[in-house]
Image (spheres, rainbow, N blue to C red):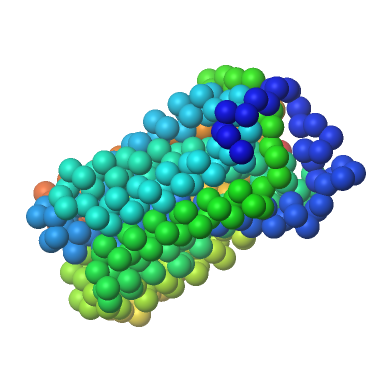
Amino acid sequence: MALTDHVEPFDHPGPSDRPDRPGHSVRRGWTAAAVVAAGTFTVVTSEMLPVGLLTPIGGALGVSEGTAGLTLTTTGLAAAVAAPVLTPLFARYERRRVMCLLMALVGVGNLIGAWAPNFAVMTGARVLVGIGMGGVWALAAGIAVRLVPARSVGAATSLVFSGIAVASVLGVPAGAFIGEWLGWRAAFAAAGVLGLLVAAALAAALPALPPETARPRLTAPLADARVRVALTVVALLVTGHFAAYTYVRPVLEEVAGIRPALVGVLLLGYGLAGVVGNFAAGAGAARSPRGTLLVLSALLAATVFLVPALGDSAVAAAVLLVAWGLAYGGVSVGVQSWLLAAVPQAREAASALLVGVFNTAIALGAFTGGRAADGLGTSSVMYIGGAAATAAAIVLAATRRRPR
């Protein structure tokens, strides 16, 4: 089926577009939601892949670890631009075809990265990954709402965004393991093949998803003060997190003296905790998005601040990483739940804004962490992360208006 097949836009989903109406298979809807979760897993794994591979990437391409971290910055910036640009650009096209196209682009970008002979080619490959990622993430939340009965929307949203947390469990550590055994290029090649497989699975699993509006107004959700608060909080949390987490491997090696082979195991523990945090935050955010995010911000601040002081052994580092994973694992679904509750009539526009802010923050965090790591020492990135999370907690504590 061609991407350009014409579909007339309309304001609300039609009779076959909601699974709680006759003719729609609820089981197929949940299967499709699981495949979309595989998509969010793949795009986040692809974006985060350099985190566990900075040292070998820098060595192979002849750049410092701080410069190698720009592979993450580049992807984040590309996604931040792509999400608000692609959402209105593809507004008139059927969503299943758009999702498949964007996932295939992620796969191709990873394969080019696996081949990259120099840093310039790697940068171009990471731009492709960012474009595909920004589009997939912006559409994912709106698609989840359309796949399951209305009573299950919260659970489906948690499932779709569990792909982000599971990417920390299986994606980044798996990349680190593959890089340790077969080389970093093999890790990028595996991510490329996975992207193409998920694109094929989306084509098979998703139902036809006509556009909900002719052209969404991306700035409309900003009129709501709750949206502005949510975007401010996510900007602070994500900037701080990635300033610290992008350079977690060098910190663990220098502060705790942990061997490179053990880093992947610790990141696995972090990721498992992130999955728990994702579903716990999803349940909590269904009742109180603000309260849930306030708890996550405070826990994230305390944990990151303590890494340089207490992370001087493998056991202490493992405990702190588990707490870190619990806190950060719930951020995506917590903020997404806040936005869906605040502006349910503008899901795709709000999601596009979230992706733009989220990935700008990723890029800013990775860039800030890189400059701090090169200029002030690797431990300094933890203090930057803790300060940003503290600021997010203060914003939330001062907020009176909250979504229901």
Residue 225 versus residue 250 in the image, above or below = above
Foreground residue among 334 and 346: 346
What percent of the width, then of the height, locates residue 145? 70, 42
- Taking the image as drawn, is residue 53 in sight? yes
Residue at x 28% of width, y 69% of height? 179
- Taking the image as drawn, is residue 67 in sight? no
Outermost residue toward the right in this view: 22
Quarter that holds the C terminus: top right
Residue at x 37% of width, y 76% of height? 265
**Is 178 displayed left or right of 353 in the figure?**
left
**Is 267 displayed left or right of 220 in the figure?**
left
Foreground residue among 58 and 278: 58
Quarter assignment of residue 49: bottom left
Residue at x 18% of width, y 43% of height? 120
Residue at x 26% of width, y 64% of height? 184
**How many badges with numbers are in the image?**
0
Quarter that holds the N terminus: top right
What percent of the width, then of the height, locates residue 27? 78, 57
